[in-house]
Image (cartoon, coloured by chain):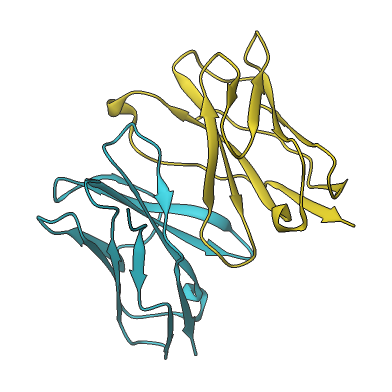
Amino acid sequence: KAGVTQTPRYLIKTRGQQVTLSCSPISGHRSVSWYQQTPGQGLQFLFEYFSETQRNKGNFPGRFSGRQFSNSRSEMNVSTLELGDSALYLCASSMDRVETQYFGPGTRLLVL
Amino acid sequence: DAKTTQPPSMDCAEGRAANLPCNHSTISGNEYVYWYRQIHSQGPQYIIHGLKNNETNEMASLIITEDRKSSTLILPHATLRDTAVYYCIVRVAFTGGGNKLTFGTGTQLKVEL
């Protein structure tokens, strides 16, 4: 079975721009969660989607948003980028909301 | 989710067993213990999880104390490729609890020749 895939793998943007990251979960998995990893804050939960609905949200500003499609693929969007948004963004999928999460390779975002 | 405490770093000789401890003294009866590892700049890799009983898979063994307040991840024959940050996480085991992993700072395991 193919693992979780994330695109793009690397991205460079400038302050004020917006960015959209994509995540394709493992086939059959319906829950997708997003995490941000920075050297200062570590790995932090952003939000979770299940059945196209956001089920859980971490402590991030409204500039961070996401959505999930009927095929369980998910996107996250960051608007009005700030330097501090430079991070590794990780997507994880699980079969349902109580099963083990499996992570993708991440998208490394650099904001200049 | 319960808080976990892990040593910041550990060293292990290649071929020897690596025993990584984790304290989760405030764990609830409905919370699992999960272990993930992250090799530099890659996505975290799932290793193993358990509720009450000891567990073993092809990667590792998980020993959970009877009172469930601590656990140990055992890599039986560590190799250089096991060098990574290891995260011990507790998470609720029911749907209403939400599907969220709370990562701490983990243990940096360094396997040396």
Q: Position of residue A62 (x, y in %)?
A: 30, 63
State whether residue B41 is above or below residue A2.
Answer: below
Residue B33 seen by the camera: no
**B33 over A95 or under it: above or below:** above
Q: Nearer the viewer, residue B80 or A39?
A: B80
User: Is residue A37 shown left or right of residue B80?
Assistant: left
Chain whose colour in the figure is yellow: B
In this orientation, does residue B13 appear?
yes
* Residue occupying the point 62% across, 15% down: B68
Q: Quadrant of residue B98?
A: top left
Judging depth in this view, the residue of A4 and B76 nearest the camera is B76
Q: Quadrant of residue A100?
A: top left
Residue at 26% over, 63% down: A65
Left or right: B26, with A11 as reference point: right
Q: Position of residue B69 (x, y in %)?
A: 66, 17
The residue lying furthest to the left in this view is A70
For the image shown, how many numbered marks are present on the structure? Answer: 0
Name the residue rendered at 76%, 52% in the picture: B79
Percent coordinates x, y for residue B50 in the rendering: 52, 24
Q: Is residue A111 above or below residue B107?
A: below
Palette colour of chain A: cyan
Seen at 42% across and 88% down, the residue is A15
Q: Is residue B3 left or right of residue A71?
A: right
Residue A70 screen position, x and y as percent: 9, 55
